[in-house]
Amino acid sequence: MFESSIAIKRNKHNHITFTIFGLGLTGAQEIKRLETIHYRMNKYAEQAFTEKKLNGLNNYDEKHILLANVAYKIVLMSGSEIINDSDRTTANLLDCGEHYGYRRPIAGIISRIREEISDEQMKEMDIWSITALHDHILCVDGFPYVLRSSRGGEGSLLVGYWSHPDIQWKSNDTFAFFC
């Protein structure tokens, strides 16, 4: 993992904010980069980055790639923003983020976020995982996935996490948006 020099702040809603910079990497380039910095990935994250077409749809394509050298302001919002467990769905979390003026992220932010925020920093902020509720990526099983990174165990883990509008998330899940 790289040494972080990121400036973490809190906004008026007490949400964590910081800036990351895009690298303009394709899915194959992301896999290679993540392997060199000892990220672990599950098979769905690897499939998401493969750029193969499934049913005519691209996986990790230009709509998921952060542009090289472009600054992206990120905000992290806790799932606890929605009190009732049954209401904490992907669709409602996106609506909640929109209520604060946040925008739907793209998949490429997850690996950049975890290069900047260490496991130790996540622990200090009481965050176990960060999920981007980006446009879904279809994996070979045909199901929709979003990218998520978590801490602990054997180091940073990047996963493709099954998602759809009605999935119910936990109150301690953390979600990344553009702000």
Image (cartoon, helix red, strand yellow):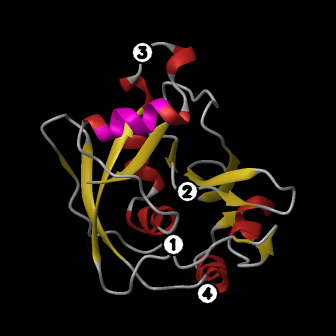
The disc label shown at residue 135, or none: 2
Element at label 2: loop
Please give left or right for residue 25 compared with residue 94 in the image.
right
Mark 3, other Cα within 10 Å: few <14 / some 14–19 / many ≥20? few
Relative height, residue 172 to residue 3 (above, below) = above
**Foreground disc of the pair 3, 1:** 1
Q: In the image, residue 2 lies at what x, y percent?
A: 43, 75
Q: Which residues are magenta?
A: 92-98
Q: Residue at x 20, y 61 (%)?
A: 7
Q: In the image, residue 1 lies at what x, y percent?
A: 50, 71
Tell whether label 1 touches label 2 (CB within 8 Å): yes
The disc label shown at residue 29, or none: 4
- First in sequence, mark 4 or 3: give its number: 4
- First in sequence, mark 3 or 2: give its number: 3
Element at label 1: loop
Whole-number angstrom distance, CA of label 1 to CA of label 4: 16 Å
Please give left or right for residue 1 compared with residue 162 in the image.
left
Element at label 3: loop
Q: Which residue is at the far front?
A: 56
